[in-house]
């Protein structure tokens, strides 16, 4: 779509006042995919909604705290220097759940809502929480330094000078991660029942999404609507950075293992038995030499599925004569660095989980490596 000159009118009423400005924007941008999507705060709702839409691959340091855009930008710039310093932490109250303290970082204007258990001195809880945040910081920089593309999502609690603040955040991210191709999605919460995404810069989007502080669940459909523009591509790099299941002799249950990466490229299905779209990717780590792969697969409408292992074509599943198929593939000549395998099934037609009421195909998939099975 050609950028148009449109007028941004105040749309967020009690949450913020958006000044009238004239800037070129693109409404309803095309869907983009990334190696990963991560929250930069400034409230828990960002991580919550990303997770509910199955776009959250790891925890960022600011996922579950109340922060502000400026301090987060400076933390990224300084490698989170002075972040979560015990000397700056003071108890300000008790959470509504009556189980955790509300602990404020008085120097950087942060509020830790979920971390400190009520009734236990902060000093006793601090060491293990310090390890948790240090781990999240290291993991955040690992993904940002090694991945090829990313979407950073941040909530702006106010709109004053927002375009310049976006540019400043973009500059800090680019200086710290020069090899990362990234976009920014800045979210404004609205008391109107709306969900809009606009592209305001070459690599920046703003979104207006309905929010009721007393009922977060009610806003789920509105977040789904704006996040449909963004997806995880589950590239080999994504799967390499994500946790891979380490198979031994026991069967892995897709429903119960959070370490397994299994997805259709259009929509992630968390139970692992179904895939949406015409591609399914699986990342797995298997000890020892693997020479044979047995695939058992059922289908209703799909005629062919083409199988790739670590980017190399392994063969095809032909369902033209039978909707259930067992086929063995010789993968002994395919390199598997660090015992990692990325399986890709490219289906002749899109696949949909029928139990959600969508039309299309469904598939039950079981794979054996030598005598090791996962399904």
Image (cartoon, grey):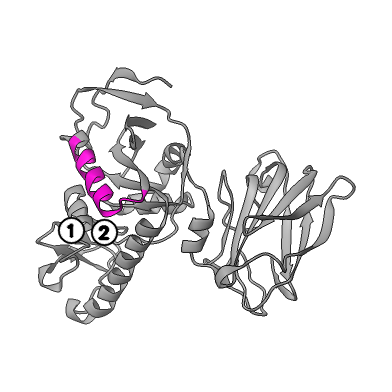
Image position of 77 (left or right of 230): left
Determine the residue positioned at 75% across, 76% down.
371
In which quadrant will I find the N terminus?
top left
Residue 119 percent across, percent down from the top left? 22, 77
Alpha carbon distance from label 2 to label 1: 7 Å
Q: Is label 1 in a helix, a strand or a loop? A: strand
Image position of 313 (left or right of 338): right
Image position of 111 (left or right of 195): left
Residue 215 appears in the picture as rendered: no
Q: Is label 2 in a helix, a strand or a loop? A: strand
Q: Quadrant of residue 157?
A: top left
| Of pointers 2 and 1, the one earlier in the residue sequence | 2
Determine the residue positioned at 66% across, 47% down.
353
Residue 129 percent across, percent down from the top left? 27, 74
| Chain part drawn in magenta | 164-180
Q: Are marks 2 and 1 in contact (CB under 8 Å)?
A: yes
Depth order, front residue of 87/356: 87
Residue of label 2 = 65
Vertical position of residue 47 compared to residue 285: above or below: above
Query: Which residue ends up furthest to the top in the rendered image?
Result: 5
């Amino acid at each position: 779509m050609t950028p148009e000159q449109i007028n941004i009118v105040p749309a967020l009423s009690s949450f913020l006042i958006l000044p009238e400005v004239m800037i070129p924007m693109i409404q309803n941008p095309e869907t983009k995919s990334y190696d990963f999507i991560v929250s930069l705060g400034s409230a828990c709702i960002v991580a919550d909604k990303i997770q509910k839409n199955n776009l959250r691959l790891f925890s960022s340091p600011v996922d579950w705290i109340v922060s502000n855009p400026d301090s987060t930008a400076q933390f990224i710039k300084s490698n989170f220097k002075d972040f979560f310093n015990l000397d700056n932490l003071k108890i300000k109250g008790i959470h509504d759940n009556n189980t955790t303290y509300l602990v404020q970082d008085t120097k950087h204007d942060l509020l830790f809502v979920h971390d400190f258990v009520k009734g236990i001195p902060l000093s006793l809880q601090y060491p293990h929480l310090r390890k948790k945040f240090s781990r999240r910081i290291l993991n955040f920089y690992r993904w940002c330094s090694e991945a090829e593309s990313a979407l950073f999502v941040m909530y702006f609690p106010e709109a004053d000078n927002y375009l310049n603040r976006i540019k400043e955040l973009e500059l800090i991210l680019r200086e710290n991660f020069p090899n990362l191709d990234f976009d920014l999605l800045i979210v404004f919460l609205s008391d109107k029942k709306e969900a809009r995404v606009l592209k305001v810069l070459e690599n920046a989007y703003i979104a207006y999404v309905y929010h009721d502080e007393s009922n977060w669940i009610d806003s789920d459909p509105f977040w789904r609507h704006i996040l449909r523009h963004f997806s995880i591509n589950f590239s080999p790099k994504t799967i390499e950075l994500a946790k891979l299941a380490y198979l031994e002799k026991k069967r892995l249950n897709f429903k119960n293992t959070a370490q397994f990466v299994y997805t259709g490229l259009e929509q992630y299905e968390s139970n692992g038995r179904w895939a949406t779209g015409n591609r399914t990717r699986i990342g797995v780590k298997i000890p020892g030499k693997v020479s044979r792969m047995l695939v058992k697969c059922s289908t209703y409408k799909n005629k062919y599925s083409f199988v790739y292992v670590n980017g190399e074509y392994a063969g095809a599943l032909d369902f033209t004569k039978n909707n259930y198929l067992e086929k063995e593939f010789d993968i002994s000549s395919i390199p598997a660095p660090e015992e990692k395998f990325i399986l890709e099934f490219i289906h002749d037609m899109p696949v949909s989980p029928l139990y959600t009421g969508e039309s299309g195909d469904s598939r039950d998939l079981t794979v054996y490596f030598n005598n090791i099975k996962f399904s």
